Image (cartoon, grey):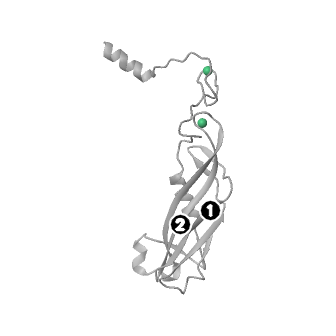
Amino acid sequence: MLIDTTKIRHLSGQTISFSLQGNLETIVIGGEVLPLDGPVEVKGEIHNTGRTYLVKGTITARFQRVCGRCLKNFTAAVETELEVEYCHASEVREEDREREEFEVFEGNSIDLTERVTESLYLAIPMKALCSEDCQGMCPQCGQDLNLGKCGCETDKVDPRMKVLEKLLKS
Ligand SMILES: [Zn+2]
Ligand SMILES: [Zn+2]
């Protein structure tokens, strides 16, 4: 995912917008492989500060996931922000070497791929839920409880509550 800097290179103090689409390496969260459902999009602005480029944008991506409660496949949409300052290798000064406030790039283009991947890793929830109120599966017969109740006798008391109950009684 490359931003061409040739248009803004000589426009010190100015901002131009950009829109990118691309693919990323496979994302794996907690052992779950998340295939991309369509390309990742990044839309935003690049600002020439005079020496560096400030890139701000919104990342949107869709992943195929498996619901942790009902085990159904669903598409999870993720949206997150990106803000990174880049400095061309030729503009890096000696005193900058100690600082890590910006990324260094070479040539005409800034490659956002790594930072986009990082931002997505931070934004994707560990636990996949097809919906906030997913009812999950019956632990006894495996029925998808979103489709209706099964006939199983389920103990309504949470086992942790039982322990508490015992403690209170003794
Ligand atoms: Zn679910
Ligand atoms: Zn059941």
10 Å crowding of disc 1: few (<14), some (14-19), many (20+)? some
- Dot 1 corresponds to which residue? 41
Q: Check the picture and name the quadrant holding the C terminus.
A: top left
Picture coordinates of residue 34, whole percent (x, y): 63, 48
Q: Give residue 57's mark.
A: 2
Q: Quadrant of residue 110?
A: bottom right
Q: Height in image: 60 above or below 44?
A: above
- Residue 125 drawn at (x, y percent): 52, 47
- What residue is rendered at 54% in x and 72% in y? 45
Q: Amino acid at mark 2?
A: Gly
First of labels 2, 1 by sequence position:
1
Query: What kind of element bears circle 1?
Result: strand
Q: Is mark 2 within 8 Å of ligand 1?
A: no
Please tell me whether residue 164 is drawn above or below residue 118 in the rendered image.
above
Q: Residue furthest bottom?
A: 10
Question: What residue is drawn where x is 66% and y is 50%?
Answer: 35
Considering the numbered disc 2 on the image, is that residue within a helix, a strand or a loop?
A: strand
* Along the viewing direction, whichever of 156 and 54 lies nearer the viewer: 156
Q: Is residue 107 left or right of residue 49?
A: right
